[in-house]
Amino acid sequence: MAPLVEVRNLRYSYEDGTHALKGIDFRLEEGEAVALLGANGSGKTTFVMHLNGLLTGEGEVEVCGLAVNKENLPTIRRKVGMVFQDSESQLFMPTVLEDVAFGPLNRGASPDEAIKRATDALVTTGMAAAAARAPYHLSAGEKKRVAIAGILATDPEILVLDEPTTFLDPPGQCALAELLSRLPQAKIVVTHNIHFAQALCTRAVFFQAGKIAAEGSVPSLVTRFGWDSAVSPR
Amino acid sequence: MHHVVLERWSRGASPLHRRDARAKIAGLLVFLVVTATAHRALPEVAAGLALLLIAAALLARLPVTGALARAALVLPFSLVFAAVCWLAGDPARGLALALKSYLSALAVLLVVATTPLPALLAGLESMGAPRFLLMVAQFLYRYLFVISEEAQHMRIAAASRGATRSGLAGFRAAAGALAVLFARSYQRAEEIHRGMLARGFTGQLRTLAVARFRAADGVFAVLAVAAPIAVRVAVERMA
């Protein structure tokens, strides 16, 4: 069976000359949840932004058998749902319902159909009661759930989550892991949160200076790169 | 934050809140024209129009003193020009400027405070306002709060490092903070744009608000258009 995502020798440099990605090879199979670990600036976020064409580098990126190029972008953006680190930037419509309906409306859904899809997605993420509220009145955890609902409403096959636990307290992180583990889509999770990665992901890759340095289970990579003792107790 | 209060007010359920945005916009436009062109017996006409707006605020179950105070935000600007007119030997013009600007601000505030923003923008769009301008207005309204919060955080961070608001040092710190705020806003705009693209945005903002113009809205529109004209005509005749 063809992988959902296949990346071969992906390279990318920013305008200032920084080589952010130096030859990435990556596969994501159906039903997998993969954690992308690595230090700040190691290229994780830059990498995931290639999966739906927000950035374009050299090399090959295929999503569901389609090459990521201008022609395929509408289809690929339908298949890859991206949840950004700062939900505040993702929730830009005046009310929660309108924000979640934004994706379906862009996909050509009628207002009634968009409302139905948005309501279903809000029920899935446990945010149906907030439909009429303004996004800036929500807590960080609620904003994250609404941002995820906004992606689910477009019925994606792959969820890409960039630092999903940022701004969340421990109970919020647990609730998010529980919610995400219930969702059937394949997942790519960029995170520094080892416990969260361990609770959610079946596999992990470790980014180092724009390359994938290692691949394996979350505990094995954490031990190998010494991330389990990043802050030692006194 | 004023716009948070207005947002809360706009989600009310009074008879005025239930009316279609287009009916209110039509009434507002006529009110603004009636106010701007009034010249005979201006203080009396202004008092009549002010009573009309207060009646509307009561009908909308808004806190009248709060609404009156918020509309006064326009006065620091208009009073400067009014003072210039007064100093130039034309106190009547100065008074007219202050009265008209305040009444206009109050009328706009009442419409904004009784109409949720999506409905207001949809109404303006269906009346022919440029879509791009409305999109900019919507984003400005949405992120004003976020940017203001960032500014507050920077102010607290500066104060906690002993910064003062006065003098050249204070000015330099404020200028630096403003530059950082601009850079952050620019960065946020890019993030928002990425978020929009990732959800299939192709340049046209599609919204859910499909407002239906009912018979009651038609009746309200006629009344809202006729009321300021009637008040002005009646007061001018009496004067």
Image (tube, coloured by chain):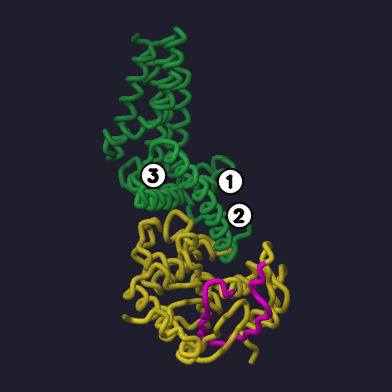
**Residue A30 appears in the rendering:** yes
Region of the chain picked out in magenta, as a range: A18-43
Q: Which residue is mark 3?
A: B3
Q: Which residue is mark 2?
A: B204
Element class at badge 3:
helix
- How packed mark 2 is, by other alpha carbons closer than 10 Å (few <14, some 14-19, many 20 or more), is few
**Front residue (pair A215, B180):** B180
Which residue type carries mark 3?
Answer: His
In-image side of A141 versus A91 (left or right): left
Chain under callout 2: B
User: Pointer 1 and pointer 2: residues touching (CB < 8 Å)?
Assistant: yes
Using the image, determine if residue A20 lies above or below residue B174: below
Q: Which mark is residue B131?
A: 1
**Front residue (pair B15, B4):** B4
From the top left corner, tell me how far across and down residue A232 is, in percent: 37, 81
Hue used for the chain lettered A? yellow
Which residue corresponds to the image point at 68% horizontal and 62% vertical from the top-left?
A15
Which residue corresponds to the image point at 43% horizontal and 78% vertical from the top-left?
A193
Chain under callout 3: B
